[in-house]
Amino acid sequence: MRKIGCFSPAAWILTLGVFLLTWTAPAAAEKKNLKFGADWAFYGVHAPFFVAQEKGFYKAQGLKVKMSRGYGSSGVLKELVAGTNHFGFGDAGATMLGRAKGHKAKLVGVFYEQAPFLIYTKKNSGITKPKDLEGKRIAMAAADINKTLFKPFAKATGIDESKVTFVIVQPSAKLSTFLSGKADGCGFFVTLDPLMNKVTKKFGGYNRIMYAHHGVDIYSNAIVGMDEFIKANPGSTRGFMQALIKSYKYTFDHPDEATQILLKSQPHLNAKISRETITALEDLLVMTPAAKKNGLGYMTKEKMKRTRDIVLTAFNTDPNKVSLKDAYTNEFLK
């Protein structure tokens, strides 16, 4: 057989075969231009996201992040499933519910370590504890998560649900219905405290009946991404979480500056209420004893299981449809 140079054709073929068997394509570069969806229209609780942009925390991780407002946690999941956003700020329970329906979304870090769900009442009403709600009217929206979780809340506190009347109104009408006296209480998030403080002065202030303090101690808003994206972009996922953890800490250490950064992008917001909302965010949702002990973003198996079981049961869904080991991870927090 004629040789080519110092190799015969057979040798060339053998060498080529070995190369093709052992060669692997270089890994695709990770996504660095990220799209991030919030849970709702921007206000004080979203200050850390704007601080991360302004202070260069994303940039320091090699990331560019484009942020958009949201339309509820179900909307956050829809955007992720559609591929419109890479990460979202969604409720942990809603993510579990989505996973039960086949949407492969994963929690990579929780910031609302304490759930914000509650019922506000007027100070002069004398309604201060769960059992006081019997015989009363509560303003709720038809799809209000506070309404859905009222069942486990009632079960945990011994409330007779048949003695509670829900006044179903549009979300925008809940507060006015409550303040006008057409309802004795209303379901909201605790981050409404600064506004509630302002609008209930003539009633002597307000009372909070928080679900988390009465048997519904679950996780709420967290950073969520799809399994496939997270697996393909572990470095970007870690960088995104590290930037946000740093930003939450900076926001709480510099609340006045954080307020001004938020107002630069959202000038229509009230400065005083925005500043007070950051304090409420820190004290009532994020910097809980557990967060101080374990670190921002950390999720325990015990509380994650409780979150899954309570929320899915409230939505008449079998909790066992969701595997905990697939639903969340702490690996990107350090």
Image (cartoon, rainbow, N blue to C red):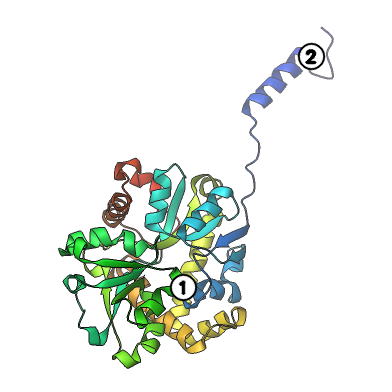
Q: Residue furthest left?
A: 158
Residue that appears at 46% across and 59% down: 73
Q: Nearer the viewer, mark 1 or mark 2?
A: 1
| Residue identifier under label 1 | 172
Q: From the viewer's perspective, tell me whether residue 186 is left or right of residue 22.
A: left
Identified by mark 2, the residue type is Pro
Quadrant location of the C terminus in the rendered image:
bottom left
Residue 217's image quarter?
bottom left
Please say if 300 is above or below 139.
Answer: above
Marks 1 and 2, how far apart in space? 79 Å
The picture quadrant where one finds residue 36 is bottom right
Q: Are marks 1 and 2 in contact (CB under 8 Å)?
A: no
**Residue 50 horizontal/vertical position (percent):** 56, 74
Q: Is residue 61 visible?
A: yes
Q: Residue at x 21, y 62 (%)?
A: 161
Q: Relative to 9, is 313 above or below?
A: below
The quarter of the picture where the N terminus appears is top right
Q: Could you tell me the amino acid type at mark 1?
A: Ser
Which residue in the rendered view is the most extreme toward the front? 182
Badge 1 marks a residue whose secondary structure is: helix
Q: Position of residue 273 (x, y in %)?
A: 46, 85
Q: Residue at x 49, y 62 (%)?
A: 241
Determine which of the numbered discs, if any, sits on residue 9 in the image. Answer: 2
Query: How many residues crowd mark 2 within 10 Å: few (<14), some (14–19), many (20+)?
Result: some
